[in-house]
Amino acid sequence: MKKTENKKILVAQSSMPPFEEYVEMIRPLWESHWLTNMGDYHKRLENELKEYLKVKQVSLMVNGHMALELALQSLNLPRGGEVITTPFTFISTTHAIIRNGLVPIFCDIKDDYTIDENKIEELITEKTVAILPVHVYGNVCNVQQIEMLAYKYDLKILYDAAHAFGENYLGKGIGSYGHLSVFSFHATKVYHTIEGGCVCVKNQEQYEKLYNLKNFGIRAEDLVVSVGANAKMNEFSAAMGICNLRYMDENIRKRKLVFEAYQKYLSECKQITLNRYREGLEPNYAYMPVLFESGDMRDKVYLELRKENIYARKYFYPITADAACFRNKYRLHALEKARDYSKRILVLPLYAELDLAQVERIAGIVQATVRGKR
Ligand SMILES: *Cc1c(COP(=O)(O)O)cnc(C)c1O
């Protein structure tokens, strides 16, 4: 066996800018000793991201989860209010709701894994205060219908756009939808700042609110204007973000090649369903979700890949509504599709530097397994 075939392949691999480039970026920090607290790189990255994401303004955060928590908090929703959300997401989305003293109301999903906008209305009660959908795998939610519902019932919309960095939908930056949208810049995401995230805001007032929430409400040496946490992004992360942003378009281009190679090898395979992007979306090719005919088949493929040192992920399994810590705590409505998909879904490795020969090998293992040849 060739040496490369034994190399561990994980579902994602953090993109790295050229080492020297990053070193050059951080060298000035040894002069200034200014390592955090809204330094030069923090300001610069907020501006660069605003342009790249095509949004009004960006507030950088220490990570995507705190961005979600503080974005929700900044909406001043009444405690105990109900937030309609999807259970087919990373646990962070649900935790952010609960840690804000709000109640998650889980809505089922549709074929593209995003929240089923046609099932939202029946979940709305007099306690409903917001909708928190997720652009899962970079698939954009039905933003128009969700906006109409929010308008009709006077609800806030917060998008968890952690998977959707850099995407445009109908010519607009995906972060410009909803009252607020949140991105994660975790090391495993399409774009990263090692750890990090941001909230996309629409006006200066929202920006100031988030500034206070991420910096203890401190506005001057002797002036604390509100209660706040500490969720600032440091200068090393911001520097990494500035470097990585230069390579984003190239990164997405390479991801597209990997995605297309998977399509080529797997689209004829009857036992599986591949992800399809919605018309009008410029995707980022963040993930390669594959839906199998049965849960047993998914589990078998997962194990067969594992035997070859390939680490696909059962992402998202279980659904967040079924997490051990929430058991019997929240009102659960029908979540058939979310539960069914979560048992049959597998996310295959996809990252810019993934060799196309490896894609062929991974697809080959998937095919052989579903055809009972492994
Ligand atoms: C990654 C992720 C988050 C959390 O972001 P962190 O930066 O890891 O805190 C939230 N929601 C979704 C859907 C994610 O994938």
Image: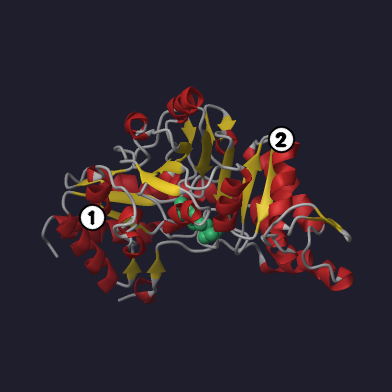
Quarter of the figure with the C terminus: bottom left
Answer whether labels 2 and 1 touch (C-beta < 8 Å): no
Label 2 or label 1, whichever comes before in sequence order: 2
Left-right relation of 355 to 38: left
Q: Residue at x 45, y 30 (%)?
A: 146
Q: Residue at x 52, y 46 (%)?
A: 253
Is any atom of residue 267 visible in this view? no
Left-right relation of 371 to 54: left
Along the line of sight, the residue nearer the viewer: 285 or 7: 285
Residue with the mark numbered 2: 203
Residue 279, located in which quarter of the rendered image?
top left
Question: Where in the figure is residue 76, as x and y percent of width and height?
Answer: 60, 43
Secondary structure of residue under mark 2: loop
Residue 343's disc number: 1
Left-right relation of 355 to 112: right
Q: As shown in the figure, which amino acid type bears the numbered disc 1? A: Lys
